[in-house]
Amino acid sequence: MSLCYYCKKPTALHKMKNGVRVPNNARTVDHKVPLSRGGRNVAENKVVACYGCNTEKGKLTEAEYRTVLYYRHTETQRESDQAKQLLGSYDTIDWTLHDLKLLYEAGVSCE
């Protein structure tokens, strides 16, 4: 099993057919520096990436895409911390981030 170079989630081999939606975890080969940006088609510039990350990365370089991932993670962590503050010591295992954001936006206090 190969992990995505960017999100570290497992990738899987999928047969890609015309007109069929490709699963986000489909294994693809990504160029860290895209060919369109001067990258070379050599092993050192290729990594295994899931379809989701590869298509989202598009023509970004590895460094540019990692910046996007960093800020996304930072924002998600900030939202999670806000939700934990809102809920205090309540068990949040069954709560989704979406549920917690709705509570927070509604000003609901769980204390």
Image (cartoon, rainbow, N blue to C red):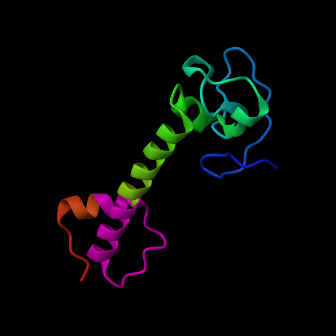
User: Does residue 72 belong to the magenta stretch?
Assistant: no
The x and y percentages for residue 71 are 39, 50
Q: Which residues are magenta?
A: 77-101
Residue occupying the point 63% across, 37% down: 24
- Asked which quadrant contains residue 42, the reply is top right
Give 87 or 68, whichever is nearer the viewer.
68
In the current view of this chain or complex, which residue is farthest to the top?
A: 18
Q: Is residue 102 left or right of residue 96?
A: left
The x and y percentages for residue 65 are 50, 39
Q: Is residue 109 left or right of residue 70?
A: left
Which image quarter is the C terminus in?
bottom left
Give 62 or 28, whichever is nearer the viewer.
62
The x and y percentages for residue 61 are 53, 33
Residue occupying the point 26% across, 78% down: 110
Where 80 sits versus 53, above or below?
below
Where 84 sits versus 39, above or below?
below
Q: Magenta region's main secondary structure?
A: helix
Where 63 sits versus 85, above or below?
above
Residue occupying the point 60% across, 25% down: 34
In the current view of this chain or complex, which residue is farthest to the left?
A: 107
